[in-house]
Image: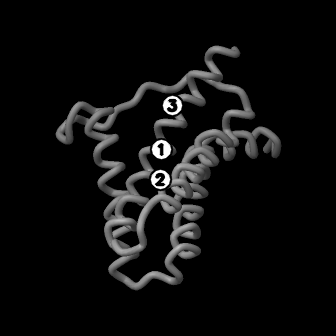
């Protein structure tokens, strides 16, 4: 087994999930910083927001919910694009700006909105990263 080839395959297949994980975890940490440790309702509200955001993106990408999941293979891209600095950093910046501008009187709504915002922003910025890499290559 060629270890570098295997490592490269692992990193390529894990890249987008890694960026999304950092975005969701980081968003949760920003919420904890703003609100302290959340109760179960705030956690469920955050998860519900992320699910709604993901669902909206899926409805757009697959033109509804009853379409077969099928995607074309994406062309190869630059290694630097797999780090997702723009998508992860941008999504966390958007969440931080949102939290700075949001009154703390509506924690359930805020947790929901942050879940949706993190999911949608990460994925939209991921598309922009792909466009930028195509322009460079």
Instruction: Look at the numbered disc 2 and give the secondary structure of its residue.
Output: helix
Q: Is residue 71 left or right of residue 4?
A: left
Q: What percent of the width, then of the height, locates residue 58?
A: 31, 41
* 58 and 67: which is toward the camera: 58
Q: CA separation, marks 3 and 1?
A: 10 Å
Q: Answer whether residue 14 is visible to the viewer in this image.
A: no
Residue for badge 1: 121
Residue for badge 2: 118
Residue at left offset 68%, top offset 42%: 85
- Mark nearer the N terminus (3 vs 1): 1
Q: What percent of the width, then of the height, locates residue 131?
A: 56, 22
Q: CA separation, marks 1 and 2?
A: 5 Å
- Mark nearer the N terminus (3 vs 2): 2
Q: What percent of the width, then of the height, locates residue 15?
A: 62, 44
Residue at left offset 62%, top offset 17%: 134
Q: What percent of the width, then of the height, locates residue 109?
A: 32, 66
Instruction: Look at the numbered disc 3 and give the secondary structure of its residue.
Output: helix
Q: CA separation, marks 3 and 2?
A: 14 Å
Q: Is residue 118 left or right of residue 55?
A: right
Outermost residue, left side: 66
Q: Are marks 1 and 2 in contact (CB under 8 Å)?
A: yes
């Amino acid at each position: 087994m060629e270890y570098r080839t295997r490592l490269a395959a692992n990193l390529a297949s894990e890249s987008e999930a890694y960026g999304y994980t950092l975005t969701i975890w980081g968003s949760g940490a920003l919420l904890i910083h703003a609100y302290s440790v959340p109760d179960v309702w705030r956690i469920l509200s955050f998860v519900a927001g992320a699910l709604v955001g993901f669902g909206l993106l899926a409805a757009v990408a697959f033109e509804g919910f009853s379409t077969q999941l099928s995607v074309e293979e994406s062309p190869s891209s630059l290694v630097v694009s797999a780090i997702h600095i723009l998508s992860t950093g941008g999504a966390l910046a958007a969440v931080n700006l949102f939290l700075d501008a949001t009154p703390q009187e509506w924690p359930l709504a805020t947790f929901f909105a942050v879940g949706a915002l993190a999911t949608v922003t990460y994925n939209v910025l991921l598309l922009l990263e792909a466009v930028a890499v195509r322009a460079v290559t």
